[in-house]
Image (tube, rainbow, N blue to C red):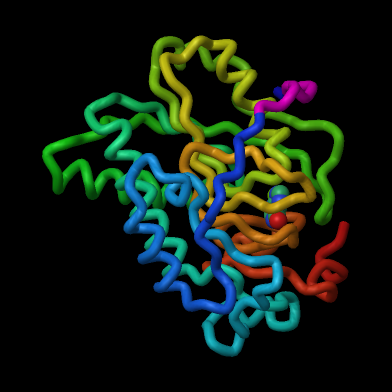
Amino acid sequence: MLLLLTLPSRKVYKKPATPVRLGHRNLSECVSENNMANDASPKRRDGIVIDDNWSGYSLDLFSYPSHYAGDLDCVIVPHGVIMDRTERLARDIMDDLGNKDIVVLCVLKGGYQFSADLVDKIKVLSCNSNRTIPMRVHFIRLKSYMNDKATEDLHIVGAEDLSFLTGKNVLIVEAIVGTGKTMKTLLKHVEAFKPNMIKVAGLLVKRVAQNSPWLPDYVGFQIPNRFVVGYALDYNEYFRDLNHICIISESGKLKYKV
Ligand code: HPA
Ligand code: MG
């Protein structure tokens, strides 16, 4: 069953003055700078910001499935860095929500890997600290992309009856946020079921052409406005079986176009 939803008006997050930038500096420098930020700082909210003019890592420096040779321009976020950043996001979530029951709402398909890794890392913290987060996991599916373009219609599958969310603490886990329209539509839908609290974790926020991007509560990376694949993000269902987050090449787009 499909629900067809219209897009709501936007709520804007004010861009902080000095975000952590990645590009012309090494990754560990940026990660450690971000870790020193205290909990309420704008830096923590921004995540790791990858500059528009950063050319990424050469594919020759990493291993990846040989069936994608020629289909990718570069590695923009290596798998190990995704895992390190996710570990820190888990800690931030534990700091904010420790000892609260939460329902993780995993946004499929792209969010399956990030959700699985984030839940794993929260589980580790629940075992190894004096705080714990009991978690239930629910899956919904959103679909609005054809080739590398968003279509007008947003389909939400598996969200017909979310009445079990009433009074619960909900953590929506999404792999990528663009304009924020899709997420705001989903938020409006979830809010209708009157949860106690809703937080959003987004691994990637794409810098689309607008001054004040909508930011999730927990942001992994802010990235240039390019089409990325890997770590469960697809182009027409391909590239989910790639560990690193990469920029797809023009020939890759042609090869898998529908
Ligand atoms: N890659 C994959 N899926 C997406 C993207 C992207 O860059 N943007 C929105 N959905
Ligand atoms: Mg997709």
Q: Residue at x 50, y 60 (%)?
A: 20
Asked whether, in this view, residue 254 is left or right of residue 232, the answer is right
Q: From the viewer's perspective, is residue 25 above or below residue 188? A: below
Query: How many numbered dots are placed on residues in this image?
Result: 0
Q: Residue at x 74, y 21 (%)?
A: 8
Is residue 59 a member of the stretch shown in magenta? no
Quadrant in the picture for the N terminus = top right
Task: State which region is magenta.
Answer: 3-11
Front residue (pair 110, 204)? 204
Q: From the viewer's perspective, is residue 9 above or below residue 233? A: above
Quadrant in the picture for the C terminus = bottom right
* Residue 156 pos. (x, y %): 68, 28
Front residue (pair 169, 29)? 29
| Magenta part, dominant SS | loop
Q: Residue at x 65, y 74 (%)?
A: 54
Report the residue that reaches farthest toward the front.
17
* Residue 221 pos. (x, y %): 54, 56
Report the residue that reaches farthest toward the bottom.
60
Q: Residue at x 48, y 68 (%)?
A: 79
Res. 7 visible in picture: yes
Asked whether, in this view, residue 231 is left or right of residue 199, the answer is right
Asked whether, in this view, residue 104 is left or right of residue 257, the answer is left
* Residue 143 pos. (x, y %): 72, 39
Is residue 10 a member of the stretch shown in magenta? yes
Res. 4 visible in picture: no
Front residue (pair 16, 101)? 16
Q: From the viewer's perspective, is residue 33 above or below residue 28? A: above
Report the residue that reaches farthest toward the left.
130
